[in-house]
Image: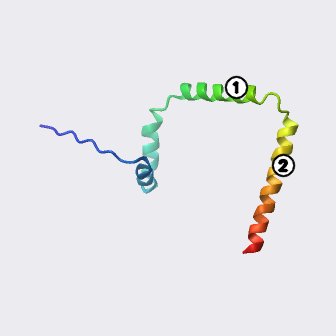
């Protein structure tokens, strides 16, 4: 006679349990789940998402993107300096 028991474990508790595993057991878990990954589907979804992003932002030049990235980086660094100066 066998008994089947279903246990519902919240995802965050499962993640925490995996993080608490000894380092030498994590690769075994990785290999186990690696077999279940459908790489072709992931590649297709990534390619479709990339195509959507490119078509959505096709009217924005690389120069505009770089200028905005530099401005945002400058602002973030300035804020970080201000926070450090207050401490």
Q: Is residue 12 above or below residue 40?
A: below
| Structural crowding at the residue carrying mark 1, measured as other residues with C-alpha within 10 Å and reported as few (<14), some (14–19) or many (≥20) | few
Quarter of the image that includes the C terminus: bottom right
| Rendered location of residue 78, percent (x, y) | 81, 61
Residue 50 image point, x, y percent: 68, 29
State the image coordinates of residue 54 (x, y, percent, origin top left): 74, 28
Residue depicted at x 77% and y 62%:
79
Q: CA distance from mark 1 to mark 2?
A: 25 Å
2 relative to 10 in the view: left or right: left
Tags 1 and 2 in contact by the CB under 8 Å rule?
no
Quarter containing the N terminus: top left
Q: Which residue is mark 2?
A: 70
Q: Secondary structure at mark 1?
A: helix
Give me the residue at 77% from left, 30% from top. 57
Farthest residue to the bottom: give it: 87
From the top left corner, tell me how far across and down residue 70 is, in percent: 84, 49
Residue 84, image quadrant: bottom right
Q: Residue at x 44, y 54 (%)?
A: 16
Give the quarter of the image for residue 48: top right
Q: Earlier in the sequence, mark 1 or mark 2?
A: 1
Position of 18 relative to 59 (above/below): below
Relative depth, front residue between 80 and 38: 80
Within 10 Å of disc 2 (Cα), the crowding (few <14, some 14-19, many 20+) is few
Q: Is residue 8 above or below residue 83?
A: above
Element type where label 2 sits in the image = helix
Between 18 and 14, the residue placed more toward the observer is 14
Q: List the residue tagged with mark 1.
A: 51
């Amino acid at each position: 006679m066998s008994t089947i028991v279903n246990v519902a474990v919240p995802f965050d508790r499962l993640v925490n349990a995996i993080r608490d595993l000894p380092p030498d057991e994590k690769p075994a878990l990785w290999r186990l789940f690696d077999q279940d990954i459908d790489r072709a589907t992931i590649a297709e979804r990534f390619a479709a998402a990339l195509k959507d992003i490119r078509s959505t932002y096709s009217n924005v030049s690389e120069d505009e993107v770089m200028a905005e990235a530099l401005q945002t980086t400058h602002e973030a660094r300035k804020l970080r300096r201000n926070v450090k100066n207050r401490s």
